Amino acid sequence: MPETPIKETNSDETHLMYMHQALSEARKCTHVPTAFCVGCIIVVPVASDAVNGPTSVDNAIVLATGYSRELPGNTHAEANALHKARQLESLPPALAPFQNGTNQPPVAPSSISNLLAQASIYTTLEPCSIRTSGLAPCANAILEAGIRKCYIGAPEPLDFVTCEGAKILKEAGVEVNWVKGLEEECLSVARGEF
């Protein structure tokens, strides 16, 4: 199935705005010395006539958010956002009725799998490729979800493991983009320096 392009501007300002939202999620983390504080948002395109809702930005909505350790079990931001997105499947088709006052779905597909295949994921730190806890890495979760665009605020530092999340995603055909301008802030927040 061909990829449906996201109807968002390709401006640096748009990507910075989404990364700021992911940083807001990361700041919700309880800092622990053995793990990073990471934030994540999943953005999905909407039809141009459904853009008036409160979470709409440049023809896209935030489908789900997540941050490190938000859910029980030493969970990571990307896994939490994906888990929360999958919980939306029980809503009426494609999240309708949406908060913009219409009963039209924000996008044509009626399943969360189709929504995720059109989504972009924004994460403040490179998705992990290895977990010391033995849990599944976030790079794998992104691939399993079928997400085709990943925007990253900063590479994962070597504090705990050698991360190859961006490489794994690229090799699997995911478009990986590094959002310039917030790297230092993403790394500071990752280390609990809010």
Image: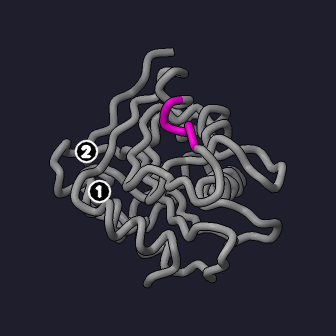
Disc 1 marks which residue? 51
180 part of magenta stretch: no
**Residue at left 40%, top 49%?**
152
Inspect the image, locate mark 2, and give the three-letter code of the amino acid beneath it.
Glu
The image quadrant that residue 69 belongs to is: bottom right
Q: How is the image coloured?
A: one colour
Label 2 neighbourhood size at 10 Å, few (<14), some (14-19), many (20+)? some
Total marks in image: 2
Disc 2 marks which residue? 8
Residue 62 position, x and y percent, is 43, 59
Which residue of the protein is positioned furthest toward the top in this rendering? Answer: 1
Inspect the image, locate mark 1, and give the three-letter code of the amino acid beneath it.
Val
Which residue is more in the foreground, 150 or 153? 153
**Range of residues picked out in magenta:** 163-167
Residue 36 position, x and y percent, is 58, 67
What SS does tag 2 mark?
Answer: loop
Residue 51 position, x and y percent, is 29, 56
By secondary structure, the bulk of the magenta-drawn segment is best described as helix
**Residue at left 27%, top 40%?**
7
Residue 88 position, x and y percent, is 65, 56
Label 1 neighbourhood size at 10 Å, few (<14), some (14-19), many (20+)? some
Which residue is more in the foreground, 128 or 98? 128
